[in-house]
Amino acid sequence: MNDYTVVVENLEKRFGAFVAVDRVSFRIERGEVFGFLGPNGAGKSTTIRMLCGILTPSGGSGTVAGFDIRTQPELVKTQIGYMSQKFSLYQDLTVEENIDFYGGIYRIPPEKRRQRKEWVIEMAGLTEHRRRPTSILSGGWKQRLALGCAILHEPPVVFLDEPTSGVDPISRRRFWDLIYEMSDRGVTVFVTTHYMDEAEYCNRLGLIYRGELIALGTPHELKSETPRSDGTLPSLEEVFVSRIEARDRVEQPEREVRR
Amino acid sequence: MFERVKHMLIKEFIQVFRDPRMRVVIFLIPCVQVMIIGYAVSTDVKHVRTAVYDLDNSRPSREVTARFVRSGYFDVTERIGDDARARELLDRGEVSAVLHFQHGFAEDIHAGRTARLQVLIDGTDSNTAGIVAGYAVKIATAYSKHVLIERVERAFGPAGKTGTIKLQTRAWFNENLESRNFFVPGVLMIVVALSTLLLTSMAVVREKEIGTIEQIMVTPITPAEFILGKTVPFALIGLAQAIIVALLGVFWFEVPIRGSVFLLLLATLLFLMNMLGTGLLISTFSQTQQQAMMTTFLLFFPAMLLSGFAFPIANMPQVVQWITLVNPLRYFLVIVRSIFLKGVGLEILWAQMLPLFAMGIAMLWLAVRRFHKTL
Amino acid sequence: MNPRRVRAVARKEFLHVVRDPLSLLMALATPVLLLTLFGFALTLDVDNVPLAVWDQSNTPRSRELVGRFDGSPYFSLRMNVDNYRDLVHAIDSGQAMMGLVVPSDFAEKIEAGRNAPVQLIVDGSDSNTAMIAIGYAGVVAEIYALDLTIEQNQRRGGPSLNIPLDVRPRVWFNEELESRNFIIPGLIAVIMMVIAAMLTSLTVAREWERGTMEQLISTPVKPGELILGKLAPYFVIGMCDVLLAVLMAEFVFHVPLRGNVALLFGMSAVFLVGALAMGMTVSIVTRSQLLSCQVAVVATFLPAFLLSGFIFTIANMPPVIRAITYIVPARYFVAILKGIYLKGVGLEILGAQAALLAVYAAVMVTLARISLKKKLT
């Protein structure tokens, strides 16, 4: 069954003459964990922002959970959870106040809200700190709380923009457990990352470079496409480095010749 | 709609009032302003420190001096004997006026010639100087009239009685011409305007600056809900401040409130629409709190000066008077003063309420339009 | 104190200023805008007070009296009414500020040699203008009475009379009684106070809010160096503002500058240091931009405007408030500016004011230095 929750067709975003995202197309199935990789400034965050409906695309089309990101951004917003790479909860509010605030903004019914709040507090391990301002929390706690607030309303699609940067390995591990739990419950997870070990956990991967999607497939597929000279499968890191170098050669052949 | 706005309100209130110092500031500012203005602001010119430089030292010169003192406007603090001392006293600002009688003053008067009195006035404050000069002319003219009537009556006897006019002055609305009755209602306008403008413009920009606005943008909240959530708390704070100022004015300074309190509240709400709209508009143009604060000030300062708070609009050049027609502070100030002192109602104040309402709607509409929800 | 570190902080702060052209523009445009406004638009002079007349007498005599009012530059006749209700409405609605009621027996009483009362009703809500207008009305009435006496005497064939006393007010320092001549020097002080506090009141609070302060205090930079470095660029901007203001006063408004120009700039520099350091102290203590700006406004704008002697004469204030004005630096600066501009006096007379201004600056810099702690809360 073709059950795609995120469909993107020739998506494009220009800022003046600069093309941040260049005709990107992909589809993501329901319950899939989709990893979106690429060096800094490649267009990852811009893509996510367009998918979340807070940035209007310059060209192409896309749907998230069946809603058009161009014409129905407000409806898209009811179907998604978003966690930005920067901690964007209120530092001067306590853990509970932040959760209550987003519970109200997402209009979760009161009965359900209490239950979700307890779930978030427990999931984030903040039972003892529920009345503390979030400014004093450590990175791992902040990150789990931010995720909790983003999925408070149990959205079918979740966008996580570099959720684990600056977090210790144990917290990262726990965080990925949460991602799998969501995926098991049929939630589509769109995650960007720098870490190659995290990329291995994803069902499918997209590699974006200078605004263009230069690779798409499961980790295994990507590795098989560029086997090492001795026939063994390369690591993901090797795959990506070679893909990016290949791309550079296409764009700047003359430099290659001179070398 | 209501649910989301409610949670925005709760959040804003927690943020504003979490810092105990902010609580103090918000409620102390109006009190401090009323107190300072209630006590400090007095434009009455009385007891002008005066030096007498009397070279004639005759009965008429002493009588004229006595008339100056009796008027209550002049206090003689020093008698001096030379020009240099007069110069020095004025330079140091120790006296503001010098009465200078030349030799032969009495002789002129007795001979029926015109005697001359020179009054030196410190002009560094032209307002006071003008008033002092006016007093001097009035006192001198009254003396002249007195001398002439005496002379005429001496010539003709009782038949020479001269008819004269007597001015019976009555000040309405502010019988004792108390400056504070004029200025304290104005403070209400200033307090409400300044704090709501600053709070609104900075509160929105703060979310931009810290980055929390991004997380709000991806929720299904509508711009209207966000704006309501960002303005209603500050409207309530502004209203609370207005009430504090009004109470202090009425009960502490005994400023009369002769008109309808309800009408005052209604006008305050109309005025708040203007201030909140402007604050939001500023926030859409600013990226940092510093920019928001400076823009607010750059707008507020001239708006206040052109509101009629301290400088009467009627005396401004015509072009500037036209400009004041788009100044919401001007309308609100007229309303506040009229309700406090004149006790007039909607039958006269509609002419102020209407533009206030129209501009309020326009400002809010502009703010909402510019308030793009997309980044 | 290490000059290299001070320079590094100053350079960084300067870059912040330059990279934010909007704020920089506003810092420079505000004084120009305000001076223009004040210079051209604002005046405390009272003239053309709108007058409504109810002339019940309607005789040549009464019309002459009304003519005297209308003919003086202080009053301008806006309307004639013929009943009390219209008079009340004219004053209630602000169309007229003064109402002159001449009773029907006015002329008869004058001719009979009796006192003829005339009623003057004033809208007292603006007590200042009302008081001045009443004063003018008194002058107009007295002169009219004087002329009546002379006229009646002549009609009876009495000897020709001279006016016994002629008063010549001579205004020193500001001969034409230009209110702009005294407003502009005072305004320079108020503007400088506000701008200075605005410039610095957010600098430290912003660094705390953004978290960059944490990085700064982990370096060996000393609090004194940090404060000096942060003050430097704003001092430069502030002095540019002073220069702009002085140039405008000279070439646009032709306010006479009778004293020493070097002294003017020297005193401005002292004042500026104090005001900037005060803003910075507020910023350091509050650590929050929203709070800091509210405090700065109350601590600078209001006192500078109300308690400096700029508009409201300090001598008329009650003793408690007068005592408070001694801690308002703008008070000294206003006195100094008026002294230099209009009186042309120097330190021999302004010495005490200058010394107090310097003390204020020193106290504020010290306060900033003490309150800046290189510790997280």
Image: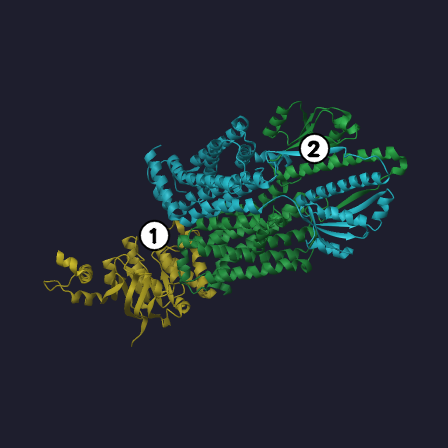
Name the quadrant containing residue A64.
Answer: bottom left
Q: Where is residue C125 in the image (x, y as percent from the top left)?
A: 68, 48
Image check: A167 left or right of A128?
Answer: left
Q: Which amino acid does label 1 sit on?
A: Gly
Tell me the chain of label 1: A
How far apart marks 1 and 2 lie (CA) works out to 74 Å
User: Which chain is the one coloured green?
Assistant: B
In this view, the residue in front, C239 or B140, is B140
Of all residues, the one furthest to the top in this rendering is: B81
Q: Residue B279 carries which label?
A: none
Q: Mark 1 points at which residue?
A: A139
Residue drawn 38% across the image and 38% down it: C229
Is B87 situated above or below B360? above
Q: Position of residue A245 (x, y in %)?
A: 18, 59
Chain letter for the cyan part: C
Instruction: Chain letter for mark 2, please.
Output: B
Residue drawn 10% across and 62% down? A229
Seen in the image, is B326 located left or right of residue B255? left
Q: Are marks 1 and 2 on the same chain?
A: no
Judging by colour alone, the chain drawn in yellow in this rendered image is A
Residue at numbered disc 2: B74
